[in-house]
Amino acid sequence: MSLIHLENEDFNSLINSGKVLVDFYASWCGPCKMISPLLEEISNENNDIKIIKVNVDEHNDIAANHGVMSIPTLILFENGNEVKKNVGFMPKEDILNFINN
């Protein structure tokens, strides 16, 4: 569907409808750099999920509000509600299972 790099958008309105995967990352984080192209592929291949990348250095308030203490952290939201959370790198198939199961 779409991959959004959070800048000035309203985070809560972005996660408010449908299935949304949020990637909390930092530009200096090695595992974050490894997962980023996988998320790009998934966003290009799937029309039923929105993926939002949130830089924890720029949006530490949002990260803190969602209990992010390590990166990368992926949080799946459905209609604004947190459904599940995963910390650390995952291969593409595991990310897809995380989203779909």
Image: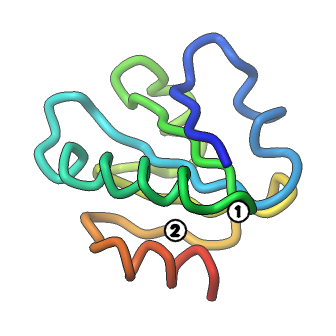
Question: Percent position (x, y) of residue 78?
Answer: 79, 63
Question: Percent position (x, y) of residue 29?
Answer: 16, 40
Q: Is residue 68 above or below residue 60?
A: below
Which one is nearer the viewer's eye here, 67 or 12? Answer: 12
Which one is nearer the viewer's eye here, 3 or 62? Answer: 3
Q: CA distance from mark 2 to mark 1?
A: 8 Å
- Crowdedness near tag 1: few (<14), some (14–19) or many (≥20) residues, C-alpha within 10 Å: some
Q: Is residue 40 left or right of residue 38?
A: right
The residue at the point 48 percent across, 33 percent down is 54
The amino acid marked with disc number 2 is Lys
Task: Please give the residue where the numbered disc 2 appears in the rendered image.
Answer: 85
Q: Is residue 38 above or below residue 8?
A: below
The residue at the point 48 percent across, 37 percent down is 53
Question: Percent position (x, y) of residue 89?
Answer: 25, 65
SS at circle 1:
strand
Q: Is residue 7 above or below residue 32?
A: above
